[in-house]
Structure formats: structure tokens, C-alpha cells
Image (spheres, helix red, strand yellow):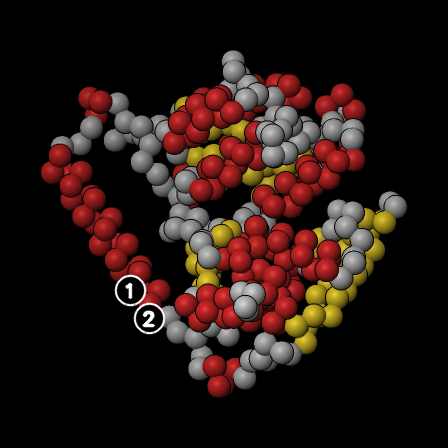
């Protein structure tokens, strides 16, 4: 049975009209169903709720980032970023295409204010964390990247898609396919349980009181300057644990850790970036100490979710609760 896949095109609107038209044409040539808000760009909360319903019906979420962050909600988050958050929350496969060099985009298609450019940079960094992204510099290159990326996504992350009513398989066949899917999922979960970590005594991990140095960079003038902070595993856990009472994305945790560390230690905050290798060490250490679990959102996603273990939750209360 031939399936057609519906793809939601997410981007700022006015500055990327021509690029969106090329992307739409490319998707149609691939027998995909493009879905976007060409007629009704997102400008308020009511339309955002409508957009969420459209995203629910899509197989893939295509994010295009150019030189603008876009109009924002009352909480200061752009509607494009809101759409992205919703697609991630719903575990819809995300394809992210970022402009290679936003500073080369003409002024009329770029954010001029430092605040909006910082928000755009932060959004780009968030999207780039934990997933593969591709880059483009013009509309033709963007269309080519869309064709390649969608084909790869369909191959790597197959979805339900849309099938003409007169081509639908019999009920028995669909039931058999569903049973096989459940069996496959059960086998994958069994395999995950069988994977083991070496005994902690063999690893000899540092305890909570041990010191650790975190590194990063910030924008100083036209160049990036390095910073480093001496902290401890206890302080790191103290800073991030309140955000881990529910499943939380790795990108969000990294942002909370960076913001808390640089604020507490007085590091200059302009376009600050935490070293990713240091953050990955934090992730491993927190797991080895038995304080957090880190798992993929689902079998189709490479995004990782953090959550406190019972041991971690108990320690958080011990550190955070104010004694009478």
C-alpha cells in the first residue's frame, strides 16, 4: 500500500515566504502532504491551539530557522519555538534545518535587537542539542536538504502515514501488524533491561563532596572568551534536582545548569555556552551515583529525558527542605 506522509512546516513567516514555497513544492514532488500556516500565520494563543491540532495529524515536523526569532507569547517564547516544544512533547520526528550563517542574512529579514538575536541563538543551540541538524544558505540548498532529510526520516523513523480508503488492508492484517509491533516493543524493552553497567565499586566514582570544574564560553566583544567554575557534585545536583521531579529534556536541564552556575558564580552571561563534554560527564556521574535515570523519549526519538530516582528524590528533599 502506498502511503503519503504529512509534514508540518514550522518557521517564521514573513521573512521566509519564498523558502517555504520552495519547501512546499519539494514535499509535493515527494508525494508528501505539506501542512503549514501560509494563510493563517501564528499570531495569538487561539491559533496556536489550532496549530497543535494540525501537528497532531502530521507524521514529521520540519523546522526551518533563518534570521528571525519571531513574534512571541506573553512569556517571551516565540510561536515557532512553541510549535517545536509541542512536536517534541508529542514525540513527532523532528527535522531541523538551520541557516548556515544568520549574520549574512539581509537586515530586513533579520532580528536587529540584541535581545531577539540572543533568543534566536539560544533557540538554535537548544535545537542543535541531542539531535542531528543540517544547514542551508539559500532557498535552492534548503529544498535539496529537505528532500534528503525527509527521505532519510521516512526510512529511519517510519510512521503511520495516510492511505487512500480504497487501499486499506483488511482488519485481520492490521491486527496482525499491531500485534507484531507490540511484540517488537516488548523485545526491545527486554533488551534494554538486560544491558548492564559495571559494578559501582569497579568504577570508583567520586562522591558528592568531590570537586569538579565546569567550563564554557561567553561573547566578549566580537570574540568568545572562556570561563571555568570550580564546584562540586553536590552543588550540581542541588541546582538541577528540582527540575527533575518529572521527565525533563536534556536540553532543558543543560540550560538550567548553565544559568544557575553562571549566576551563582558571577560569570558574564552574554550568549553563554556550557561545554557539552562537561555536561555529558555530569550526566554520566549523576547516573552512576544512582540519582537520576536518563532514557530516550521513545523508540523513534534520540532526545533524552532526565528524571530523579527514588534515591535522588530523597536527597533532593534532604538538601532543599528548610528545617524548622
Judged left or right of residue 144, residue 267 is right
Label number found at residue 288: none
User: Helix, strand, or loop for circle 1?
Assistant: helix
Q: Position of residue 121 (x, y in %)?
A: 70, 41
293 and 6: which is toward the camera? 293
The quadrant where residue 204 appears: bottom right
32 and 91: which is toward the camera? 91
Q: Position of residue 314 (x, y in %)?
A: 46, 69
On the rendered image, what quadrant is the C terminus found in? bottom right
**Dot 1 and dot 2 residues touching (CB under 8 Å):** yes
Q: Position of residue 192 (x, y in %)?
A: 35, 64
Label number found at residue 190: 1
Q: Which residue is mark 2?
A: 194
Does residue 287 show up? no
Q: Position of residue 85 (x, y in %)?
A: 51, 39
Question: Which residue is the extreme one toward the right?
Answer: 221
Q: Residue at x 39, y 51 (%)?
A: 298
On the rendered image, what quadrant is the N terminus found in? top left
Q: Is residue 266 above or below residue 205?
A: above
321 and 211: which is toward the camera? 321
User: Helix, strand, or loop for circle 2?
Assistant: helix
Amino acid at each position: 500500500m502506498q502511503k503519503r506522509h504529512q509534514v508540518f512546516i514550522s518557521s517564521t513567516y514573513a521573512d521566509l515566504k519564498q523558502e517555504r514555497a520552495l519547501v512546499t513544492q519539494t514535499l509535493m514532488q515527494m508525494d508528501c502532504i505539506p501542512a503549514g500556516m501560509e494563510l493563517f500565520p501564528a499570531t495569538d494563543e487561539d491559533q496556536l491551539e489550532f496549530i497543535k491540532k494540525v501537528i497532531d495529524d502530521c507524521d514529521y515536523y520540519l523546522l526551518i530557522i533563518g534570521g528571525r526569532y519571531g513574534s512571541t507569547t506573553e512569556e517571551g517564547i516565540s510561536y515557532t519555538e512553541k510549535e517545536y516544544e509541542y512536536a517534541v512533547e508529542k514525540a513527532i520526528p523532528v527535522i531541523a534545518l538551520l541557516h548556515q550563517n544568520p549574520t549574512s542574512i539581509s537586515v530586513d529579514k533579520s532580528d536587529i535587537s540584541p535581545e531577539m538575536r540572543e533568543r534566536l541563538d539560544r533557540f538554535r543551540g537548544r535545537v542543535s542539542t541531542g539531535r542531528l541538524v543540517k544547514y542551508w544558505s539559500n532557498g535552492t540548498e534548503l529544498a535539496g536538504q529537505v528532500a534528503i532529510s525527509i527521505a532519510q526520516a521516512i526510512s529511519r523513523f517510519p510512521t503511520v502515514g495516510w492511505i487512500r480508503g480504497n487501499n486499506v488492508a483488511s482488519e485481520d492484517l492490521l491486527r496482525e501488524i499491531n500485534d507484531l509491533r507490540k511484540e517488537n516493543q516488548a523485545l526491545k524493552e527486554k533488551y534494554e533491561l538486560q544491558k548492564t553497567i559495571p559494578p559501582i565499586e569497579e568504577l570508583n566514582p567520586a562522591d558528592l563532596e568531590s570537586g569538579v570544574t565546569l567550563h564554557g564560553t561567553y561573547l566578549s566583544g566580537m570574540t568568545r572568551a572562556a570561563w571555568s567554575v570550580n564546584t562540586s557534585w553536590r552543588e550540581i545536583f542541588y541546582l538541577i534536582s528540582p527540575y527533575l521531579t518529572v521527565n525533563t529534556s536534556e536540553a532543558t536541564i543543560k540550560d538550567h545548569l548553565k544559568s544557575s552556575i553562571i549566576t551563582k558564580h558571577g560569570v558574564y552571561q552574554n550568549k553563554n555556552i556550557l561545554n557539552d563534554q562537561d555536561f555529558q560527564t555530569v550526566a554520566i556521574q549523576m547516573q552512576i551515583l544512582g540519582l537520576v535515570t536518563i532514557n530516550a523519549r521513545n523508540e523513534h526519538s534520540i532526545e533524552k529525558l532526565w528524571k530523579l530516582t527514588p534515591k535522588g528524590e530523597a536527597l533532593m528533599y534532604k538538601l532543599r527542605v528548610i528545617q524548622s
